[in-house]
Amino acid sequence: LRRLRERLARSGSPLGARLLSVLSRDTLTEDDWDELEETLLLADVGAGPTDEIIQALRTRVRVEGLSAPGQAREVLREQLLALVDPSLDRSLRTEPVTAADGTPAPAVVLVVGVNGTGKTTTVGKLARVLVADGRSVVLGAADTFRAAAADQLQTWGSRVGVPTVRSDRDGADPASVAFDALRTGRAEGADVVLVDTAGRLQNKAGLMDELGKITRVLSRDAPLSEVLLVLDATTGQNGMQQARVFGEVAGVTGIVLTKLDGTAKGGIVVAVQRELGVPVKLVGLGEGPDDLAPFDPEAFVDGLLG
Ligand code: GDP
């Protein structure tokens, strides 16, 4: 978390700095309010949440004024924190579950999202976190479209020391690979099965069919523990469009926001949570194996405010 804060601080956090510089002015004109609004929109906070925060700030300023030093920061901090919603349950469900036949089964975590957002990397990092925590993990390479994708996952598997279930041939049925991974996980008494998927948005109907089938196959005997949607924080409104598309598929339970190290536009956290109604649970802060952190609202907002 300290790392998250440091990195967000290092990324320059112009959002917090710009908001504070406007908000600290002696009297706020309509132009100042427009500037605040624009700053929030540019940081990908989204139109609805931006309206909310502006209204709330206007009320606070009218009622209390912002005369005391540091008060602007405190008010802004409270409002941003409320938008990020610290009350959401962000824990990752990775405890083993009970299958329909009463036997214990691994927790299944399905990872979905558009190619290039960081799915495979996230699966690798997550495996590492779980293994460090003493859990046994099996990886499933259900992106069978490109052999390179399975290779990449397998490389992560070797690096972390966990088995990777994959198909030998390109174009194999992704759902059957996912099912194989689950079967292997059960046979080996694994705690968690992490399934990586393809994300070719060019063929939306095909992709949705594919994910639907994977979901059905994986939840035949026991409910899926998590469906994590991976979004690239640097893609702004494109990311929001993706979130909408994937949100329509079998219940996303959490969001992983990757490449937060590469942007100061952290406002996407607020926008995407609102859009999907599910919390950001994890953030990606780099390409390395240790660059995955639980999302911490307070650290995040402090990072934004610098
Ligand atoms: P996939 O196609 O969705 O599986 O995406 P990959 O896992 O292959 O990642 C695409 C690229 O993004 C790779 O070069 C990763 O190293 C990089 N990447 C993934 N997560 C992060 C992150 O949190 N920060 C940064 N800077 N790069 C990331």
Image (spheres, helix red, strand yellow):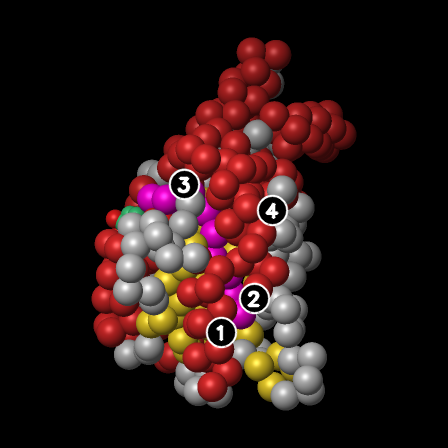
Does residue 37 appear in the picture of this structure? yes
Marks 2 and 3 close (CB-CB < 8 Å): no
Which of 30/134 is in front? 134
Residue located at (28% from left, 79% from top): 161
Q: Residues within 10 Å of mark 2 (few under 14, many from 20)?
A: many
Q: Disc 3 designates what residue?
A: 200
Q: Residues within 10 Å of mark 3 (few under 14, many from 20)?
A: some
Q: Of the residues under marks 1 and 2, which one precedes in the sequence?
A: 1
Residue located at (44% from left, 79% from top): 184
Q: Disc 4 designates what residue?
A: 249
Name the kind of residue labelled 4 in the image.
Answer: Val
The N terminus: image quadrant = bottom left
Element class at badge 3: loop
- The magenta segment: 108-118
Element class at badge 1: helix
The C terminus: image quadrant = top left
Q: Position of residue 16 (x, y in %)?
A: 46, 36
Element class at badge 4: loop
- State whether label 4 is within 8 Å of ligand 1: no
Q: CA distance from mark 2 to mark 3?
A: 21 Å
Q: Disc 2 designates what residue?
A: 218
